[in-house]
Every structure is written in C-alpha cells, then in structure tokens.
Image (tube, grey):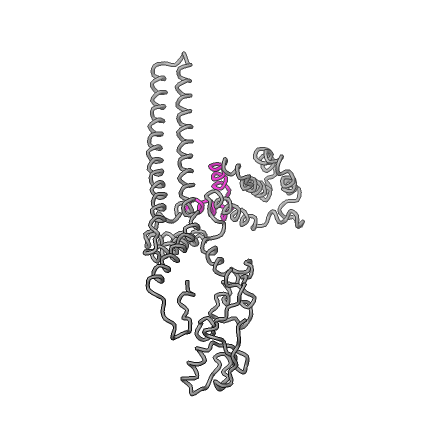
Amino acid sequence: MEMDSLPNGSATSPGPSPGPTAAAAPSSKLSHLSESLKLEHQFLRVPFEHYKKTIRANHRVVEREMSAVINGVSEAADRDDMSSDDAVNHLSSLVSRLQGLKRKLEEGSRTEHLQAQRCRARLDHLESADVESLSDWNNTRLNRILVDYMLRMSYYDTAAKLAESRNIQDLVDIDVFQEAKKVIEALQNKEVGPALAWCAENKSRLKKSKSKFEFQLRLQEFIELVRAENNLRAITYAQKYLAPWGTTHMKELQRVFVTVAYKSTTECATYKVLFEPKQWDYLVDQFKQEFCKLYGMTLEPLLNIYLQAGLSALKTPYCYDDDCTKEDPLSQEGFRKLAQPLPYSKQHHSKLVCYITKELMDTENPPQVLPNGYVYSSKALEEMARKNDGKITCPRTGLVCNYTDLVKAYIS
C-alpha cells in the first residue's frame, strides 16, 4: 500500500485520471480486508467451543440428576416395608432434588444464552467490516490482539480494563482465560487438584487428542509423596492412579518408581531432575498448550504471530550488522529476538531506497555515488546542492564534495 504513494520522479508526466484511481483504491482495500478476515478463525472458534462445552456440562448435570431421581423412585417402589411417612420423606427429598435441578438448568440456560449472544456479536462484528470503516475495524482488531496478549501473559486485570474501556468485552475471551488462571495459579503453588479436576471435566476430548497431561500430573503427585518420604502412600497412590497407564507409558513409570529407592536427595542426574522445581514450570507450559488446543487457539499470542509475519518480510542478513539503520525494526533487540526463528526474506529483485528521502531509487530517480562510496538518490542530492551552492555533504560520514564529483550508478 505504501508503494502507491511514491512519486514517479517525472514532473511533466500527466497525473492519473480520477476515475481509475478512485476505483483501484477501494478494490485494493477490499482485497486486503478479505485476506484479513481469513485470519479470524480463532475469533469465532473460541466462543463456539466454550458454548459447546457449557451445553455438554449442562447435559451431564441433567443425566446425572435424572438418573438419581429415577433410581430413587425405583428403589422406593421395590420396597415393601416402607411406611407412609418414610415414603413421603423419600419423595419429598426427590422433589427437592428436582427443584435443585430446575435452578441449575435455569442458571445453565442463562449462561448458554450469554455465550450464544457472544457468538452472534462476533459474527456481526465480522459482517460489519467494510472499506469505509476499515480504519475503525482495524483499531478494534488491534485492541483485541493486545487483550489476547495480556491474557496469555497473565495480565488479567489490565486486559479487562482495556476491554472495558474499548467496549469490546464480547469480542475477547476474558472468561475463558479466567478458567485457565485458576489452574495455572494452582500449579505455580504446587497444587495439582484444580488441574486434575480440569482433566476430569474435559476427559473425553483430552483422550481423543491423546493428551499425556493427566499422566504427567499423576507422576508429579507421586514424586511429591516420595519427596515427603511417604513411600507407603506413594506406592498405594501408584497402584490406584498410575497402574492404568502402564500399557502405554511403562518406561516413564519405571523411571519414576525408582525414585522410591533413590529419594529426593539423590545426586544421580537421571532421577535428580525429577525433583527439581522446574518440573512444575513444565506442567504449566503443558497445561497452556492443552488449553489452547482444546479451544482452538494458536499456541503463540496473536501479537507475536502478526509481528513475525511482518518481520519475516523485513529480515535480511544486513539487519544484524552493527551499522543497521535505526529505521529498521530489526535494529532493536526485542524484534531481533522475535525474528530469530524466522527465515530470511526471499528477495527476487533488489530495491534501493534512499537513506535521505526514503524514496525508491529507480530509472526515474537514479542513484548517484559519492567519492566515499555512499549512494543516495538524485532527487535528494540535487536538492542538497541547490541549497548549498553546489556542495554535497554525506549525512553518514560528513564528507563534503562538489555535485560535479558524483558518479551516476545504473540499475541492471
């Protein structure tokens, strides 16, 4: 888009007719908008997955409660020795249970309605994108990306305030990340209870994706029992919770079981690493990965992905030289670190950009070489010579020379 604004260097060339230009600009913006919408998969997927999860949870509650009530009625019907008072009390308890189920269903229905509204709001937001409002729409998307980054970096309060100030609560996933927050904080406090509860809640989907997260949690709980030298309880725990994993993870189990003999004070590197605090950090990272896969999120923050997409087009070996121009984003250490895993940009044709004017150097604005070897555009040097009585000063080295000393360079 920026290339359209570059002058062609010819003062005598007639300007383009208003008609084609006006038609070309909206067409280009419309194409850009269409490409942008292709990147909004996560924007729709996350609330939809959350909606489905709520429906499944409500369905399980209904099945569990109705099954208990039906069994209670059957049990009462099969008993011949039940007195009238006992029958009344039994039926009253069943009625109370059904009333409790009704309250849960009403609450669940409200939650489903809110989540359905959120899905609708996001569809409406995507449908509202058009060429005329593209600038406002892009600003909203930038705010969404920033909120996503803050949530992934655990800046929950800041993310909530930004979403509220921009009125985009329905367009971000704060409530989804709040669910993850509880598990992450528990793991950071060396507690596996909330994480195991999360695994039980999503057992079928984790099993379908062949997740090892629950197994890793059970191993860590076993290690903590060994660390506390509660070996008898550790063995009992292994028999109950780790034995079922034996058919698929026998080697890992054998390695962990040996820690009962070595204990937490061992200096053997193979087993010492199992007692290191960083094992909890691994569990946090693994949970984040499983959580993102469950909701269809990208593993990397959206902000990193968008920045890397731009940096991949700018990254060249020259970016890592000491004399890299400060205008290049990759002259900054933060961007260099972000671009480290990216390949270099593939340039089929070199483009020369003037250091002074930042305009493209081509046949209409040819490059000229100073005696010290530095190259600048003819426009910039002609302007400098006109203001300084034919003298040229190199902005990089300070060299002063006459305009007549310049040598024209040719682009093949």
Q: Is residue 411 magenta?
A: no
Q: Extreme top residue here?
A: 80
Q: Is residue 217 above or below residue 393?
A: above
| x and y, in percent, of residue 299 in the image | 50, 49
Q: Main secondary structure of the magenta part?
A: helix
Q: Quadrant of the N terminus?
A: bottom left
Q: Is residue 183 magenta?
A: yes
Q: Is residue 163 above or below residue 210?
A: below
Q: Quadrant of the C terminus?
A: bottom right
| x and y, in percent, of residue 68 in the image | 41, 24
Q: Is residue 101 above or below residue 314?
A: above
Is 406 in front, or is 357?
A: 406
| x and y, in percent, of residue 80 in the image | 41, 11
Is 358 in front, or is 163?
A: 358
Q: Extreme bottom residue here?
A: 389
Residue pictured at 32% horizontal, 56% vertical: 132
Q: Which residues are magenta?
A: 178-202
